[in-house]
Amino acid sequence: MNTILEVENLKVYFKTILGDAKSVDGVSLKVFEGEILGIAGESGCGKSTLVEGVLKIYKPPCYIPEGKVYYKGIELLSLPEEEFRKLRWKELSYVPQGSMNSLNPVIKIEEQMVDGILSHADMSYHEAKELALSALNSVGMPPDVLDMYPHELSGGMRQRVCIAMSLCLNPKIVFADEPITGLDVVMQKLNLQTLGDLRDRYGITVVMVAHDMACHAEICDRICIMYAGKILEVGSTVDIFSDPLHPYTKGLLSAVPSLEKRNLKGIPGLAPSPLEWPSGCRFHPRCSYRMKICEEEEPVLEEVQPGRSVACFLYGGK
Amino acid sequence: MKKSIFSYFINRILLYALIFVISLSAFFFFINLVPGDPVTRYIQMLEQRYGLSTPASEIVIQKYKEVFGLDKGLFERYISYIKRLLFYQDFGPSFVAFPKPAIELILESLPWSVGLLGTSVIIAWVLGVILGTIIGWTRESKISSTIFTTGLVISQIPTYLLAIILVMVFTFWLNLFPMGGAYSAMLQRSFSLRFIISLIKHAFLPSLSLVFVYVFGTMISQRALVISVLGEDYIKLAEAKGLKSFRLVNRYILRNTLLPQTTGLALSLGFIVNGFFLIEWIFNYPGIGRLFMMAIREMDYNVLMGITITTMFCVLTANLIIEFLYPLIDPRIRRG
C-alpha cells in the first residue's frame, strides 16, 4: 500500500500564561492510500488538535514548534499559504467536529457549498451548483436543502451536509473530526455508513477522529491510540480489539459497555494536563502494570509485529 | 412564519410608542420643574442689558405669564400641551422669537443638522467597520496592535475637546478653514459651485471632530466582534475549505459581525446626537444643537420641547428602522 500522508514528529503547542500547553507532542504516523484510519483517545489527548495542525487551520495562540507533514512527497507545513490554500478542500478535505456551529448561520447552504467549489475549480456557478447537488444526493439529502439556512436543519442533517460539502471536489483525503458526536444512534449509524461509503465508492482515504471506540470498530481499518499528545499504539482494528497490547488500550476497551459486562472497569484517575505531562511514560501514574523504568524513561513507538506498533516497556522498548 | 414576523413588527411599534410617550412626559416635567420661567428671565435680561433700576412691575410679569399660559398649574399645562400636540400637531410659539412658532425655528435648523450628522456618522461607521475588520483579521501583526492601542486612546477623547483643538490648529494657526457658521456670509444661498465649496469648507471641521473620534470607537467594537467570530467553528470550516482571504473576510467574518454592529449604531445614536449638540455650539453651526443651547439659556419651553420631540422622533425612528432591518440581515429572525 502506498503512503499518502506521513506525519513526522509533529508538535502543536498552545501559548498560555502558564507556559506552553503541549497538546500534540511529537506524533509520527503514516496514512495509507484508500484506508480508513481511526484516531482514538479520551478528551483532551490532542486528537482534534493533531488534525488542525496537519491542515494548518489552527488559530493563535496555537503554533507548531516543529514537525513535518508530507503529502505525496510535498512538505505541507513549510508550503506558502497560497499554495496550501489550493490544496485544502481539493485534495485534503475536512469534516468538522460536531458540525452544529460549523455552518455559517447567516448564509444559505447553497452558497456555502458552492463557494468552496468555486475557490478551487474553474467553472460556472451553475456547474458548481450541479456538483453540490450530486454531492448532497450521494449522502442521501434532498436537493431543497440548498435553499435552507443551517438553523432549519437538524444536527444529523447538518452533519451530512458537511460530509457532502467535503466531498464535492473529490478529495484524496477526508479528515473527519468527531463526525458523529452528539447525534442519536440512528444518525450515527447513517453517518458512519456515509463515511464508509466514501472509501468504498470513491476510493477516498479517511482519517477519522473519535473518542467512541465502538465507532472505530464499525468502519476503521487501522486505529491509532493517542494519549497525552503521543501515540501509544497503532494496529489494525481486528488486532487492537482482539488483542490490545498497551495497558491504556486495554483500559479503553474495558470501558466500552456491552450486554454481558455491565460493570465497567475504565481507567482510574484523570487525564493529565498538557501544561505538564508526567515524566517518563505519560500513562504511568494511571497504569496498573507500571515498573520502575516507566517513571524515568519515555518509551518509543516500536514495531512489535508487522503493522503493529506500541510504546510500552512491557514489550521490549529500550 | 408570516405570523411571527408580523407580531415582531407590532411588538416593535408598540414599544416605540410607549418609549416616546414616557420620555416626552419625563422631559416636560423635567424642564418645567427647573426654577424660574422664561418671562421673568427675559425681563431680567432686559433689565441688565439696559441698566433699568426700577424692577418690572408684578402686573406686567403676571400679564405676560397669562398670555403664555404660564400661570396655570404644572399638570394643567401638561394636559393642554399634550392636547395641542395631539390635535393640532403644534409645538406652540417660541417665547423668545415670539410670535414665530417653535416648529418654524426647528425646521429651519433641522436640515443643517441632519446633513452634517448623517454624513459624518455614515462616513465614520463605514470607515470604522472596515478598519476594525482589517485590524481584527490581522490582529497578530505589530501595525494592527499599534493602531488598536492608538484608537483606544483617541476614541476616549471628548468630541468637543477635539473640536476646540481643530479650531486652534486649522483656523488660527494654519488659517485653512473658517471658524464657524454654515457658509460664507458673503454668499447667497444657491446651487453654485462657490456656495457648495463654501458649504463643505464650513462643514469640514465639525464633521472631522465627530468622524475622527467615532471612527475609532466603531473600529474598536468591530475588532472585538471580529475576534469573537474568528473563534467560531464555521470560520475553521471556511478556512479548511481553502476560501480566498477576501471571500472569507467578507462573507464569513464581516457578514456575521454586521448584526451586532448595526445594533451598536442604533444604541449609540442617542449619544452621538448629544455630542453633536456641543459641536454645533462650538462651531456656531446653525443646526438643531445650537438652537437647543440657545433655548436652554433663555428657557424657551416650547422650542426645547419641540427639539426634544424632534430628536427623540429621529433617534427612535432610526432605531425602529434598524430593528426592521434585522430580519434582512439575520435569517434566524426572519424565519425563526
Image (tube, coloured by chain):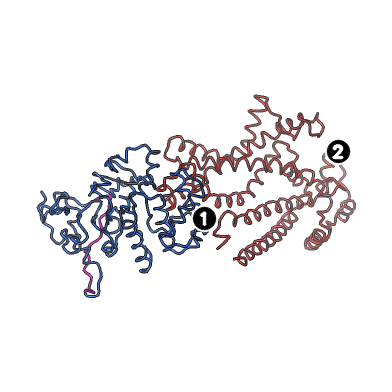
Chain colours: A blue, B red
Give the mark toward the camera: 2 or 1: 1
Main secondary structure of the magenta stretch: loop
The image quarter in which residue A157 lies: bottom left
Classed neighbour count for the residue bearing mark 2: other residues with Cα under 10 Å, few (<14), some (14–19), many (≥20): few
Instruction: Decide: is A203 above or below B214.
Output: below
Instruction: Please state which amino acid type lies under the numbered disc 2.
Output: Tyr
Comparing A123 with A220, the one in front is A123
Comparing A18 with A163, the one in front is A163
Calculate the distance from the C-alpha at mark 2 to the C-alpha at mark 1.
74 Å
Q: In the image, residue A282 lies at what x, y percent?
A: 20, 53
Which residues lie in the magenta part?
A: A261-277
Q: In the image, residue B316 lies at what x, y percent?
A: 67, 54
Instruction: Please state which amino acid type lies under the numbered disc 1.
Output: Lys
Q: Is residue A244 left or right of residue B322?
A: left
Which chain is indicated by disc 1? A
Comparing A169 with A230, the one in front is A169
Query: Residue A108, labelled with which disc?
Result: 1
Q: Which residue is mark 2?
A: B50
Q: Is residue A41 left or right of residue A103?
A: left
Q: In the image, residue B154 lies at what x, y percent?
A: 55, 38
Q: In the image, residue A222 lies at what x, y percent?
A: 23, 56
Instruction: Decide: is B330 above or below B138.
Output: below
Instruction: Decide: is A180 above or below B91.
Output: below
Determine the secondary structure under disc 2.
helix
Tell me which residue sits at (39%, 59%) in the image. A98
Which chain is indicated by disc 2? B
Tell me which residue sits at (54%, 59%) in the image. B332
Q: Is residue B131 left or right of residue B173?
A: left
Q: Say yes or no: labels 2 and 1 on the same chain.
A: no
